Amino acid sequence: MSQKCSISKTCACHNVAGCDTKEAGRIFLWFPVLHTLKKVTSYLQQSSLEYELMHERPGLSLDCKPGQTQEIARHLAQLLTPRELRETQVLFIRGAIQPQLQDFSDIASLQRFIKFSQSNWLVEMLTTESFTSHFQPIVSMRDTSQIYGYESLLRGLDEKGNLVPPGPILELATEAGLLPQLDRIARLSAIANFSRHQVRGQIFINFTPTALYDPVSCLRTTVEAIDRAGISHEQVVFEVVESDNPQDLDHLKAVLQYYRDAGFLVALDDLGSGYSGLNLLHQLRPDFIKLDMGLIRDVHQDLYKASITEKLLEIAQKLDIQTVAEGIECIEELHWLQERGANFAQGYLIAKPSAVPVSATPHFETSTLTVAPHCQLVEQPVQHQTESERVVAAVTQHIRCSLELNEILQTTAAEVRQLFEVDRVVIYQFEPDWSGSVAVESVAEGYMSILGFHVMDTCFQSTHAAYYQQGNTRAIEDVETAGLSPCHLNLLRSLQIRANLIVPILQQERLWGLLIAHQCHNSRKWQQSEINLFNQLASQAAIAIKQSELYHQLQKANQELQRLASSDGLTLVANRRCFDDTLKAEWERLAREQAPLSLILCDVDCFKLYNDTYGHLAGDDALRSVAKALETVKRPADLVARYGGEEFAVILPNTDVEGAIIVATEIQSNVSALKLPHPNCQVSEYITVSLGVATITPHSQSSPATLIAAADRGLYQAKAQGRNCMVQINCKDSDTKSLLWQKH
């Protein structure tokens, strides 16, 4: 057996092993691209360190004196980009022993290797189990003095027994591959301390999905500890750490099913803080969702947060999911959440986490209104609240149940017509030139519809705009006796209007539109209380409209950000992130369909020389031209992406070997047709490309990395064979070989 630095074996939940890289040994490095290899060899040459290159793929190995491995790792951490650190693989063998076959299971990323070599303090803490748990109460939203349960929060203990905050512990454990061990200890610590303090109520325990490999094996000790402590399974709620971004949803479902089959409850933690929260909500169907403190902070005065949180609460109520609002720090936040029907509260306003669970929490008076499921208002008897205030609150809740503008306007018109018992209610929306039209209408049966009716009043700005912009209303009891101009009177008669009430809808200083009530069958004396109520409803409608506009602006901004996040800023084709996501999605889809997937990796030949000759601006233009040439050969389902530097990638779903070769040939032809001069290149007088082509039928026992590695080997061989050619690699067996070499 070789004396190696075991990294991957520490992933077993029960096994914690250190890594003494201070000893002498040999380090093996495999790099994602040739560019990374060149950077590292340049550093090693400058440092007068001897190394041996590998031939099959970009990589090297070198002997290290005692302490030299850590020094080299520190320099590489500064030299390479974060992505290069993640994608560079490393294996360290102590002593002068050559690696054996079993050693290759211990290959890890360079980033993990560096972090693991710095993790001695955490390894010591895990080995001695120097951890404890603090508990923060979760209380009823209706009566905050009623404790429902406690969330267990992990804390470390240093050599002197001082508390170590969880942030640096979790960060290093994640990067060093020690999360499974930490997650297990956290679960056991929570159970032991909960039992020791003989706490009543529910216990909420966080867990990280990626820390569990096999639920039955990894969670056996957890379930046994719960049973030994005499804790009922119904008391335990396991929280999925949502921001952990689970990569394997099927695995996460299996973990949760194991918990549910054992009688435990499950919660989705920090909803709104991590990735794709609503998708997880749909997929996992939890018993609880915990709203992230980032959403709760200032929710009572932030329209964006309020809009999102209201919708999450509404969804949870409809699906009969209990909600816990985290991070409540002020009474206004608590009251806002009470009004909207959240079930439980947690935060510093209630109590801070403590080693000994608190047995009493303060009682805060509940707010006057709460929102029941399906946006129906539940009124509580409050003597000082007038009937009109209750009506406004009820109608407001109906108005604010949507973020869609048309739905908000239609709900407003319908609610107002029903409340005032008038024949017609319209919302009139202005255009920038002060013309306008009836955007929404609610009309009683038997009266004409004026929906879409357009008015061009060139005098409105000078005669009425300032009046309504100041928030004034206009009430006409009878159009026949109001002294209106003949043309105005004839217009109202043609629309069957006998009496009307007009109030402005204002967006700060902007007159957005008018809320208008029409009495058609007779005249009507408008009471001052009705006018006041009408004004209040118009103000609430204005707030809802503004909220909707902000929401849609946010949606558009997010869509644009998503577009920018998935495209390369220089060439405008997809970027590496989009490539990774697309390849993963196509891999999973084609694995189900058992259909072929091809990948072409394409590198512009001697591009550094081109930059040195013409400058980087000309180089950028050349890359844009090559990207366009690649785009012309792709089908709608294909993806062209900039893989890095002067490398491009083409994903070809449902494409076999022959089809991939045809596409690669077209790419070479299109690039050659550009005739971009490259006089100093020994390959050709024009810019050319080298290509690696690989095809595979995906299956569950392999990953997209298999296809990438094969195409990368093809590209590497194409360059080694003189460039301006393509090499196709067979993915069917481990001994890949060149099947095609075509020179142009």
Image (cartoon, rainbow, N blue to C red):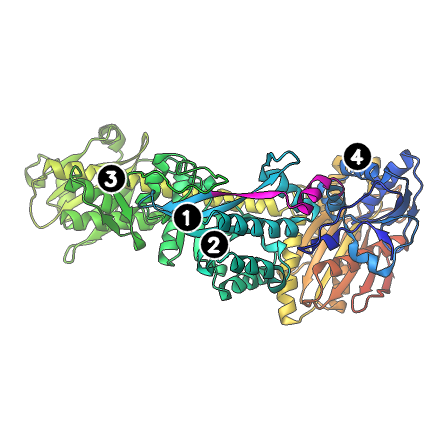
The residue singled out by tag 3 in the image is 538
Question: How far apart are the two marked residues, 1 and 2, measured between alpha carbons?
Answer: 10 Å
Q: Say which residue appears at 13% left-offset and 49% top-offset.
A: 421
The residue singled out by tag 4 in the image is 615
The residue singled out by tag 1 in the image is 324
Amino acid on which the number 2 mark rests in the picture: Ala
Q: Say whether disc 4 or disc 2 marks the residue closer to the N-terminus.
A: 2
Question: How far apart are the two marked residues, 4 and 1, measured between alpha carbons?
Answer: 58 Å
Q: Is mark 1 on a helix, strand or loop?
A: strand
Q: Say whether disc 3 or disc 1 marks the residue closer to the N-terminus.
A: 1
Q: Which of marks 3 and 1 is in front?
A: 1
Say left or right for 371 vs 151: left
- Magenta residue span: 117-135
Q: What element carries label 3?
A: helix
Question: How far apart are the two marked residues, 4 and 2, measured between alpha carbons?
Answer: 56 Å
Q: Quadrant of the N terminus?
A: bottom right
Q: Say which residue appears at 28% left-offset and 46% top-offset.
A: 370
Q: Nearer the viewer, mark 3 or mark 2?
A: 2
Amino acid on which the number 3 mark rests in the picture: Ala
CB atoms of marks 4 and 1 within 8 Å? no
Amino acid on which the number 1 mark rests in the picture: Val
The residue singled out by tag 2 in the image is 267
Q: Say whether disc 4 or disc 1 marks the residue closer to the N-terminus.
A: 1
The image shows a total of numbered marks equal to 4
